Image (spheres, rainbow, N blue to C red):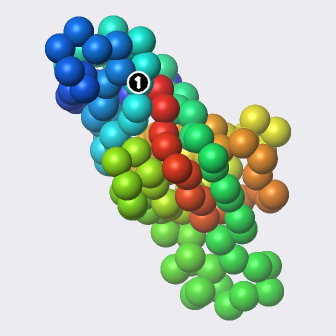
Amino acid sequence: MNKIVVENVETYSPGDESASVTLRSPFGEIVAFCHTCTLKNGDTIENHLLALDGDARAAYFSDWPEELKREKSRERLEKIGPYSYRGCGRVIDRMSGLVEVLGFRIELGEIPCEGIVEFECMRVDI
């Protein structure tokens, strides 16, 4: 998935360059921060979001029972603040720190492993 859709853009005040932008993938929704925002509803953007202060860790250990591994591998994205999220996704490029969750590609920074990771970040930026 290379593009995601801008569903809603809310500037902080009229004429402000910063905005809260709601993005939609076929599998979910995420609200991201955008500075010098020129986006409008209905635009499509490159599917590459940036996490501020991201942290990732293995979702499970290799010696865990298969049933528990399946349960811990379930993709999820939970909003825990205005732009803060925690979730579980699949590492698609460890060297770039890129994780995919619910159709969104988020660059988290350093990732300690391949496969499925749990993560948390203070802010998601466009």
**Does residue 3 appear in the picture of this structure?**
no
Q: Quadrant of residue 119?
A: bottom right
* Residue at far bottom of view: 65
Residue 103 position in % (x across, y down): 44, 42
Judge whether 41 appears above or below 125 on screen: above
Left or right of 96: which side holds 119?
Answer: left
User: Which is nearer the eye, 41 or 44?
Assistant: 41
Q: What is the total number of numbered labels drawn onto the structure image?
A: 1
Say few, some or many: other residues with alpha carbon within 10 Å of mark 1 (under 14 / 14 to 19 / 20 or more). Answer: some
**Does residue 16 appear in the picture of this structure?**
yes
Q: Residue at x 80, y 58 (%)?
A: 113
Judge whether 44 appears above or below 82 on screen: above
Q: Residue at x 39, y 35 (%)?
A: 32
Q: Residue at x 31, y 44 (%)?
A: 29
User: Which is nearer the eye, 1 or 87?
Assistant: 87
Q: Residue at x 72, y 42 (%)?
A: 109
Judge whether 38 appears above or below 65 on screen: above
Residue 57 position in % (x across, y down): 71, 65
Residue type for callout 1: Cys
Residue 54 position in % (x across, y down): 63, 49
Residue 53 position in % (x across, y down): 63, 47
Q: Secondary structure at mark 1?
A: strand
Left or right of 69: which side holds 87?
Answer: left
Left or right of 69: which side holds 110?
Answer: right
Q: Where does label 1 land, which residue?
A: 34
Q: Quadrant of residue 17?
A: top left
